[in-house]
Image (tube, rainbow, N blue to C red):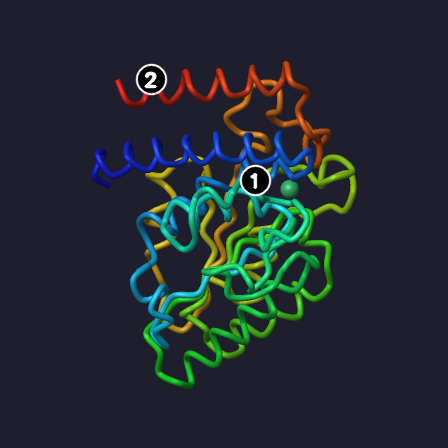
Amino acid sequence: MDNNIIHSLEITACRRRIDIVNMIYHAKTGHIGGSLSSVDLLTALYYHVMDLEKIKAKSPDRDRFVLSKGHSVEGFYAILADCGFFPKEELSTYAQFHTRLACHPTSKVPGVEVCTGSLGHGLPVAVGMALGMQRDGSGGHVYVVMGDGEQAEGSVWEAAMAGPTYHLDNLTAIVDRNHLQISGNTENVMCLEPLADRYRAFGWNVVEICGNDFSQMIPALTTQVPGKPTAIISDTIKGKGVSFMENLAAWHHKVPTEEQYHQAIDELNAHLQQLTK
Ligand SMILES: [Mg+2]
């Protein structure tokens, strides 16, 4: 991997983290921990992997992105705005009355393919998209990001059976494996391990990476195995980038106080300064 590309993606992701913290603090609502864990994955997809011109043109050959863990919407909106799908000023309306930037993604928002947020729906929808695109001979690829807590939904595993059945090598499912969900550690709430082996047993090409490391994400997101869908078990840190939020389930759905907000922004700005000096 080109170090300049990685460096540039790190800078972009840090800027989007600042957007996430600002949106949630000002709206007084949001899912900050999961947005911060998954924003690197979304940054890799939107700023490096997917062809945004085709997406903006609604080309039948476009790549499709599905944020199955729809509650982590703040990073998604911040990226869509920065990539020019809608004006950046609109981010300040997040979660306000009459906004189209609701607390879960809806297809009213330019760039959002499908309404999500009811957990366990994204992978089945993505399988349907990939199957349709395969039959239409579309060159696009479908990427879906799920939560790890979301793996407890039965519909995930119905779709996990269907993907390999239809040889959907145009589908990549990514699990944001931050090891936490709203009520605690995933292994205490509903044991997921051995998660990679479970996807392998269902017939997927499985790759295990660190989902906060672009040098691992880019090759995983751009490599396909003929005849098989790919599952990326993406180890991440919930709350990544803000020291006092990292690895704490309490930050799944919590708004920082004024003091915590300033501390978070100061930390992220210091990191950004370090990256850009
Ligand atoms: Mg999680």
Q: Tag 1, which secondary structure?
A: helix
175 relative to 186 in the view: left or right: left
Mark 2 C-beta closer than 8 Å to ligand 1: no
Indicate the quadrant where residue 56 lies. Answer: bottom left
Q: Nearer the viewer, residue 236 or 95?
A: 95
* Residue 14 disc label: none
Residue 44 percent location from the top left of the image = 37, 46
Q: Answer above or below: position of 10 versus 80.
A: above
Determine which residue is flagged by label 2.
274
Q: What residue type is disc 2 on?
A: Gln
Q: Is residue 127 left or right of residue 116?
A: left
Where 114 sits versus 90, above or below? below
Indicate the secondary structure of the residue bearing disc 2. Answer: helix
Quadrant including the N terminus:
top left
| Residue 106 in view, yes or no | yes
Pick whichever, 38 or 169, lies toward us.
38
Residue at image mark 1: 35
Q: Residue at x 72, y 35 (%)?
A: 185
Instruction: Identify residue type, mark 1.
Output: Ser
Residue 172 in view here: no
| Residue beneath the point at 65% across and 64% down | 121
x 46%, y 42%: residue: 89
In the image, taking residue 144 as reference, residue 213 lies left or right, namely left
Q: Look at the picture and state if 139 lies above or below 85.
A: below
Percent position (x, y) of residue 110? 47, 60
Left or right: 229 with respect to 49?
Answer: right
In the rendered image, the quadrant that contains the C terminus is: top left
Task: Tell me, yes or no, whether the two marked residues, 1 and 2, touch with CB atoms within 8 Å.
Answer: no
